[in-house]
Image (cartoon, rainbow, N blue to C red):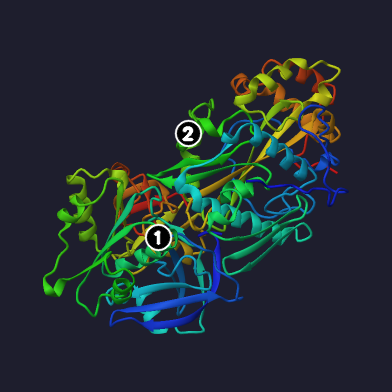
Amino acid sequence: MSLDFKTGAFNDFFRDETFRGDFTYRNSNPRRFPFPFDRDDYMYSVNMEPHVPGRPGSVFEHIFDVDEHYVAEMKDRAKVLADDPLRCQSLPHMTLAGWDTLELVMEAKARDYPQWFSLTKDGNRWHWINRPLGIEQSFTFLDESTLPYGPFEYIMRQTQGDWTLQDERDGTLWMDAGIATSQADWSVDFDVGMNFHEWHAPVPLAHEKGVFDRALKFLLKLQHGAPVRRFNWTMTVNPLLDTAPETYPKWGPMKATLTPENLGQKQHLRVELQTLYRLPRSNAIAFDIRCYLASFDEIVTVPKWARRLHRVIRDLPEELATYKGFLRNRPAMVEWLAKHDDGAPTSPGWWPDD
Amino acid sequence: MSGGAKLQVRVAEVVEVNELIKRFRFVARDGSELPAFSGGAHTVVEMDDQGTRRLNPYSLMSDPEDRSGYEISVRRDEAGRGGSLFMHRHVAPGMEMVLSNPVNLFALDNRAKKHLMIAGGIGITPFLAQIAQLTHFGGKFELHYSARSKPLGAYMDRLTAAHPDRVHCYFDELGQQIDLKRVLANQPIGTHLYVCGPKGMIAWVLSTAESLGWPKQALHSEEFLAPGTGLPFQVELAASGKTITVGPTQSLLEAMEASGVDAPYLCRGGACGQCETNVHKCDGTILHRDHWLTPEEQASNQKIMPCVSRFEGKTLVIDR
């Protein structure tokens, strides 16, 4: 089995960069970053909104955002999967949901990025072209034997973001398939087969507020054709995509390498744009956790974001800073960010002012 | 917009299946494919009945992989509020209508080793789509289907021809009844049970299975409630600052919509929970008719499901 990438097309758009070793990841245009704070403080909430196409040029322009990091992210994912195949799992009853996911991604990308992706159908005979990765594949929809991987893994090797597929049974959701190679310290291998309340058990404070009961009730009513989105965020030292519990010894110690001099370059705000889709044939729910990284240096080029990030990090409850794994570096982060906060008021919403 | 995503369709075909049932086929107005769906899903059909807006849920019965159109079957209910009569009398090929995207409250458990299906009358419709889906993916099933008489056994010929050893038919007028205890006792471990039909039949099947020790997680049922009729009543809508009167053949949800209040809904049959509304004040009795609220919640009179439930008494104030 293989999925050989023949990249090189569109090199003027897709960055040749790394998320490990020399860490050459950069944002050509930091203003495109989905800054997640719409006010100067932060607390958990369900904060769902319809996932509808939004502002042109932003990450919301299309249902799936294919950005300059696409090719590099897919190469990084292939490396992670080669080292640890258990990062992608799908229980036997989730194959149909995998086909639903493949269809969702292929149809959306071929529609929204015709210069890069193409999907033609003759009944169940499908032909897929992914030009940035140099892939061309004829296959029979709903026939697993015609793809080099199961449908879920096949399309996930060509799709940014970690995904879980959740089966709906007994009034709750079960994480019965998933892939995680760009996760904020959680594990598919550990969580697969758990239900909604089980896999959220480690999150502090939110249970007391009933957030998960309300979120589950909301998700069970999620309708096909009406996807929703929300943000989550954390902090990562160095632009690491793969911050898995399985490899903590490799990346955990990097947290201790921050100095006042290198903080702006090394410390990254890690934003998850989470989107949820009801899948048509399986009635499962697909959960896409798309990771965006921006260094503090990049963020403070937008004055409103510089002021706000300082205030959010300074005032965040200690439990949340602990859970998100940056309690030890918070004083240094606040000290660095304070120099970029002149105390001026900020406007509502997350968009830059100008 | 309440009710979620919508499909703009045209009626392609109306077929009289028997003296009580008509089948309707819908295709997209712009000629595009409709979304695939999961067996057991329903759609809410929007009707404009001479100025009265009716929205009724019907199970999708066509092959879920046939994206060229959707089919439903509607049983005429002379004593109902008028939705089925409108479908039977006024809906004709060429008419433009609006459907909700499919919603599934009666899904197959794809882990099941086998699917045991029990249908009564028009309750056969969700099973037709489920059987089509299982046939594509190789799932095992066994269907027991009872109807009043042979002429009223819609789609029996088609089912028995395609699946002669898996489909078992029963007719009330011949005094035939499924030997439920024996059927349940003969299933392999890991079988899931699905029942759709009249209220009494659902209760009988579920209680028999439970008494034989079937796990609750393996039992699935679907019954859409018609909103039902009753005496007119007044309701104060606190958030909208309106007081409305609900007519005898109108639901509270329909009365809110008629007054211009955009209230949430999905199934409009008391099953999905989308329209759940908090009660601020209740001086009287809420006539709970939904499957959603727990008996404790219903007794507390702090919540109401406006799609099916009514009120008798002096004052009802709800948070909408």
Q: Residue at x 50, y 50 (%)?
A: A95
Q: Nearer the viewer, residue B30 or A96?
A: A96
C-alpha gap between disc 1 and disc 2 = 38 Å
**Contact between labelled residues 2 and 1, with CB atoms less than 8 Å apart:** no
Report the residue marked by disc 2: A210
Badge 2 marks a residue whose secondary structure is loop
x%, y% of residue B74?
A: 36, 74
Q: Is residue A287 left or right of residue B299?
A: right
Q: Quadrant of the C terminus of chain A?
A: top right
- Foreground: disc 1 or disc 2: 1
Q: What amino acid type should be assigned to the residue bearing mark 2?
A: Gly
Q: Is residue B150 left or right of residue A258?
A: left
Q: Would you place residue A207 above or below residue B219 in this image? A: above
Badge 1 marks a residue whose secondary structure is helix
Q: What amino acid type should be assigned to the residue bearing mark 1?
A: Leu
x%, y% of residue B237?
A: 45, 54
Report the residue marked by disc 1: B134
Q: Using the rendered view, name the quadrant where residue A100 is placed.
A: bottom right
Host chain of mark 2: A
- In the rendered image, the residue lying farthest to the left is B175
Q: Using the rendered view, name the quadrant where residue A74 is placed.
A: top right
x%, y% of residue B42?
A: 42, 63
Dots 1 and 2 on the same chain:
no
Q: Residue at x 32, y 44 (%)?
A: B217
Tell me how many marks there are.
2
x%, y% of residue B262?
A: 52, 59
Examine the rendering and report whether any part of residue A24 can be seen.
yes
Q: Nearer the viewer, residue A216 or A131?
A: A131
